[in-house]
Image (cartoon, coloured by chain):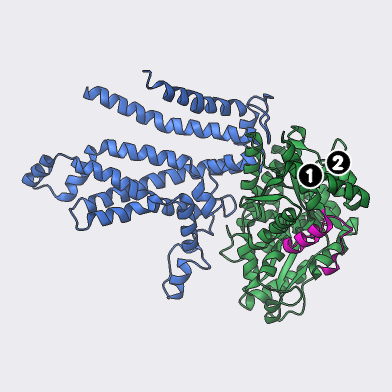
Chain colours: A blue, B green
Amino acid sequence: MLAMSPTALFVFGVYIGCIVWTCAISFTSSRILPNYEFVGLSQYYRLMATERWIVSVHNMVIYGIAYIGGCLIIGFLLAVFIDQKVRFENTFRTIHLFPYALSFIVTGAVWQWLFNPTMGLERALNELGLPVPGIGMLSNPHTAIYALVIASVWQGAGLVMIIMLSGLRSVDPDIWKATRVEGIPHFQTYLRIILPELHPAVLTSVVMLGIAAVKIYDLVAAMTQGGPGIATEVPAKFVMDHLFGRANVGLATAAATLMLIAVLCLLTPLLYLTYFRTRRQQ
Amino acid sequence: MKTLLAALFSTLITSSALAADLTAKVMHPWTSGGEAAAAKVFADQYTAAGGTWIDMAVAGNDAQLAASISSIMGGTPPTATHFNTGKPFEDLVSGGLLRDVEAIASSEDWRGVLPKIIVDAITADGKIMAIPVNLQTENWLWYSKEVLQKAGLTGVPKTWPEFFEAADKIKAAGFIPLAHGSNSFWDRFLFQKVLVSVAGPELYLKVLSDRDPALLKDPKVVDAFETLGKLRSYVDAGSPGRPWNDATNLVITNKAAFQIMGDWAKGEFVAAGLKPDVEYGCSLFPGDEVVIMSGDVFVLPKIDNADATAAQDLLAHVMFAKETQLQFNIKKGSNPIRNDVDVSSMDACAQHAAAIQKDPARLVPNPQFVMSNDMLGAISDVVTKFWNTPSMSPDDLAKGLEGAFASAK
């Protein structure tokens, strides 16, 4: 108990304290400097009437679903591939995990160049006479968000691969022997028997990716700056822009509070689910 | 005057001899080639005056603003930090976080050499609260002479119909008519340029300061919105998210004909070794020839330390000095803030701007003088969406602006 007290103090003092303060400020009229003139829900009303915020929330949902789905599928396939006792496994593992070692800023800058219609990969391929489908992804307001998804799946899939791989490696070898005896195809084994076994690995990945999706900021800042127009704006960028550049701390903290609620909505069912599973196992 | 200066110098010298630590940590957002060279003028002049300059450049206006506010609020303020002239620092003034520079300003007679509009913008309770360092023109039309020539044009278009005619020819000749890096910040520059040149300076100022929805229905304002809408089809596909200096580079390398950008773009031309009226040109056309003025100031956070205060005094003196003003503004591409600086050694663009700025009817402030960053941000969001959504009509823009006027403060 005593050993845990500094941690507890830190968690309650810093994390919980800051969260409470942020919530409180969101009910005030704070501009560039925080003040304590309470104005009720007016910042929230304004938020809900602001088109950019609505677009941001929409984008977060689209991005979140595509990002989590993409990372899980590709990460799982990569893990299965490496699990085939391939040669140079370590090399492949490093290559696949490598993007995760890059910051989102670097990832964003690289993919921004690749997608750039006037000097990027698209242009190079076009000049070679290869028409690329989905040309001008970044300059089209309808597709730009998916360019962000591609870049972040490229970055995040490796991590999911590592988590899944550790799950695959802990699968009881007897299961494999049994499926071989029964003559179940490899593919079916992975999908119907192994994947359900990986439940904790999937859960961990979904929570990590989900939180990353809610707080996505740096990739957008580096790759699209929220553009074209406001087509790729996200909640965290809304908060950051209003916190300083637009000098509206009240509105920014209201948005941050709603983001917190989004994270809680994501976490609660998952925590609930794991809690019941462990109880049932006991 | 001279004796005052001498007295000031001697106090500075004595105080520096006594304290000896005139270290100034200065925060500013100037990181691109031309801008960094301009910041170095301040650093060199300050060092020459006996101080030690610690450069705290933060890339990006918003990031620099965030860094300033955080460090001031966190109790470790820089000696001086950059702001845009106008409303952005008014909350820091009313919050009592800034020191005034009244003592130096009155002993050096700043009021006598500053445009009134600037004096008003930096004065609170009768005291000057910031060191203004330049007068920037935000609405230049930069152009590549070579591209215009190759497209068969003899000069820069003076009216908007002429501009669009020229832009069509440029497009047909295989060049980008308008180099632009689109995001909510820079799209606002196109908006204000078109508004002031089509609707005229008076209506421009009325729309931005009164923010009365009825003004958005004025035929001249509607005409401005239509012109802005038409302009959308003259940028290239790489425009969204492109940094402004990359857009300038398209004009420098003769890939694009025009760029609408503030005078800081000149720094890029200079850094590329180009000369005004030879390789590139600057114009305040098309439409009404008006200067939209903005500027940079440095504010001095209150610091309870005699050394720091002495450093702040020296900074104010050095930054406002005539010679620093001339050298800094040549590098920065802007105009000296004081009207007693001889600009004949500056380039043609600066001289042209200086001439127009003398006519108060043709000098309007940028939106930051008349509205909060919050309001400006809300307006910029509407404008950037309009700019990047070809299906949005000028009427949609007016409706969006009406919403922004009502919601932001």
Local SS, label 2: helix
Q: Give x and y (percent) for residue A234.
A: 53, 44
Q: CA distance from mark 2 to mark 1?
A: 9 Å
Relative to A128, is A141 above or below?
Answer: above
Q: Is residue B343 magenta?
A: yes
The chain holding disc 1 is B
Confirm or deny contact between disc 2 and disc 1 (CB under 8 A): yes
Tag count in the figure?
A: 2
Q: Dot 1 surroundings within 10 Å: few (below 14), some, or many (20 or more)?
A: some
Q: Which mark is residue B103?
A: 2
User: What residue is pinned by disc 1?
Assistant: B313
Q: Specify the quadrant of the image occupied by residue A281.
A: top left
Magenta part of the chain:
B321-345
Apparent side of residue B307 relative to residue B387 in the rendered image (left or right): right
Q: Compare residues B271 and B285 and report the one nearer the observer.
A: B271
Q: Compare residues B366 and B2 and report the one nearer the observer.
A: B2
For the view shown, which residue lies furthest in the top direction? Answer: A1
Q: Give x and y (percent) for residue A279.
A: 26, 22
For the view shown, which residue lies furthest in the left direction? Answer: A181
Disc nearer the start of the sequence (2/1): 2
Residue drawn at x 58%, y 60% as measured from the top left: B242
Position of the N terminus of chain A by quadrant:
top left
Q: Dot 2 surroundings within 10 Å: few (below 14), some, or many (20 or more)?
A: few
Q: Give x and y (percent) for residue A49.
A: 62, 37
